[in-house]
Image: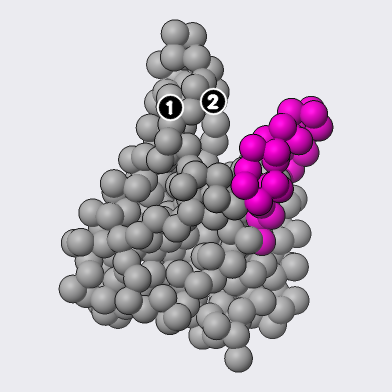
Amino acid sequence: MGLLSGKTALITGASKGIGRAIAIRYAEEGANVAFTFLSSVEKGQALEAELAAFGIKAKGYRSDASDFKAAEELVNAVVAEFGGLDILINNAGITRDNLLMRMTEEAWDEVIGINLKSCFNTVKAATRTMMKAKAGSIINITSVVGIKGNAGQANYAASKAGIIGFTKSVALELGSRNIRSNAVAPGFIETEMTGVLDEKTVQGWRDGIPMKRGGQPEEVANACVFLGSDMSSYISGQVLQVDGAMLT
């Protein structure tokens, strides 16, 4: 029996990186997994097959969580297909980095829409089901950048800081219904996105982290397993940093 046996989870932005690692760890722990992807159709189909191999129910949905109506339709489709929804993980996110003086209005709106508004959309859509069940765990993926800020990422930092305020507010509003809301703040995690960067630059980042290494997507996924499971039944409104003491 896995830590998440019998639970149904919906994970947004799961075709690669951290989202993919969360989906795999959830399947390993016995959860039925619904997930979304936007552009990576082939990766989405491959992940569905990979998850199903764990003997759980898995289904990928091509959906844009930043679209209010699409998010509502997505949650309704997942509840109809899986019979309920126990865990919601908002992981979909993008970056459009630039110094503020060069940042376009479009770059600001796009990042706020996809990173922050998507959390509002999916949580609002999932609330009715979770309230009826008098149970649920909401996990929003933020970032250490949302806590400390970062030059050249005003839009991303604002979106990730917004997620923290949103997460805490949801915890206060839904706590009486036994619905928990927490955020996970990854630090420097080594994914496909960092793999294309200059090795010398990446090593410089590693050297600046007290644990002297970047994190692995699975290490973020493990934190999500804990927060989705009954092991964290009295933990809500918290931000869990997975950053090797990068930000203390």
Point 50% across, 72% down: residue: 226
Residue 231 among those drawn in magenta: no
The disc at residue 179 is none
Residue 206 among those drawn in magenta: yes
Left or right, 166 with reference to 88: left
Q: Residue furthest top?
A: 101
Give the quarter of the image for residue 179: bottom left
Q: Which residues are magenta?
A: 191-218
Quarter containing the N terminus: bottom right
Q: Residues within 10 Å of mark 2 (few under 14, many from 20)?
A: some
Left or right, 180 with reference to 71: left
Give the amino acid at mark 1.
Asn
Looking at the image, residue 166 lies above or below residue 237: above
Question: Percent from the top left, x then y, of residue 238?
Answer: 35, 60
Give 2 or 67, whichever is nearer the viewer. Answer: 2
Point 35% across, 71% down: residue: 235
Q: Earlier in the sequence, mark 2 or mark 1?
A: 2
Residue at the spot of label 2: 96
Give 29 or 143, whichever is nearer the viewer. Answer: 143
Residue at the spot of label 1: 155
Label pair 2/1, CB-CB below 8 angstroms:
yes
